[in-house]
Amino acid sequence: MPRPPGLSARLKLTLSYAGIVVVAGVVLLAVAWWYLLRFVPDNDQGLLFTSPNRYLLSRIFGRAAAIALAGLVAFGLIGGWLLAGRMLSPLDRIADAARLAAQGSLSHRIRLPGKADEFRELSDVFDTMLEKLESHVAEQRRFAANASHELRTPLAISQSLLDVARQDPSRINAELIDRLHVASRRAIDLTEALLLLSRGERGTFTREPVDLSLVAEEAAETLLPLAEKRGITLGVTGSATTTNGSPELLLRMVTNLVQNALVHNVPGGTVTVHTEPQHQACVVRVENTGRELPPDLVPTLTEPFQRGERLRSDDHAGVGLGLAIVHSVVRAHEGALDIAARPGGGLRVTIRLPGSR
């Protein structure tokens, strides 16, 4: 935004420092003059060689006071200019870092040396912001690359099938149509998941009271056929607990957790969904049995397109955005997400959302 030219901060501080010095000097000289002249006799002739009179002392003191004030002005301007430059020098480094960041260089850090003060605190906050911004930009680039890769696969399959059908219309059969339907369905699911993830990131939704126990029961009822098909026991326990949020997003959050717990499981395993109020918060906990996960894999499960040990040939493998959507919905509702590996295998996912006021 263009701005009209004005005085620099250094010049303003210099004038302020000089003004304070001059005002303090004037006050000091005025007080000294007043106290000094109080005890000098007011005699026109005076005893010149014995004691000065007020007239003679005024002339002598006035000249000295004027010289002292001139010296104070010069000292205030020069000293203020140097002091302001020294005090504002960290701002130059912060401004340089901001210019580099505006040009796209997010790897630069200020790292001001010295003990803590306002400028060092500002520098540390700016460095922290750059680190988070650089991490966010890198994450978005990875996300865009992964999304492009994931979308390219079903679209390429669809294009290949259509090319085959165009070259030889006689080869159009039920199998080709089924494969084309699966590829199209996968592309549609991925697009819907990306839109839902974007909606959760923006946080643009209307909040209303939602009973998470009812949400858990609805999600379990929807996925019960999948649990029966895989021979997994699915149960819902706990009590009613109400939060403020979007019923659609919260239902998708719990549904994704339960589906993830069913897909990442073993035949004859269990999935438990538990809800309860806890210290003015709403807690949803989903636990499942399954394979033991490496400790370094668990923190990456909320990243987009992370499928853990899931096989891509699985009909319910999804698009790798299940836990990423869960994480996004939890953040949009100002909650906390905790994922931990169970000792015997499987995961324990705990969500804490603010209770309804």
Image: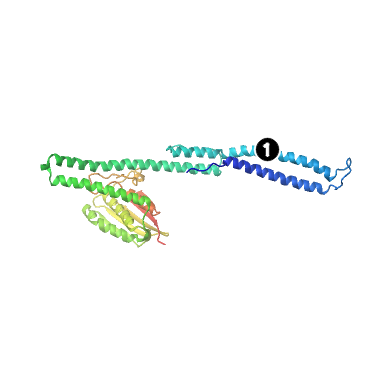
Q: How many marks?
A: 1
Residue occupied by mark 1: 74
Residue 139, quarter of the rendered image: top left
Dividing the picture into quadrants, the one containing residue 19 is top right
In depth, the one of 214 and 92 nearer the eye is 92
Check the image and tell me how it is coloured. rainbow
- 240 left or right of 187? right
Residue 87, given in percent of the width and then of the height, sits at: 58, 40
What is the x, y in percent for residue 12?
60, 42
- Quadrant of the snapshot with the C terminus: bottom left
Q: Give the side of residue 110 with respect to residue 314, left or right.
A: right
Horizontal relation, residue 179 to residue 347: left or right: left
Between residue 269 and residue 321, name the one nearer to us. 321
The crowding category of the residue bearing disc 1, from other C-alpha atoms within 10 Å (few below 14, some 14 to 19, many at least 20), is some
Residue type for callout 1: Ala
Q: Is residue 357 above or below residue 58?
A: below
Residue 187 visible in rendering: yes
Most foreground residue, 299 or 199: 199
Q: Residue 239: x and y, percent?
A: 35, 62
Asked whether residue 111 appears in the rendered view, the answer is no
Instruction: Single out the residue that lies furthest toward the front.
Output: 4
Q: Residue furthest left?
A: 170
Numbered disc 1: secondary structure: helix
- Rendering coords of residue 60 (x, y %): 80, 40
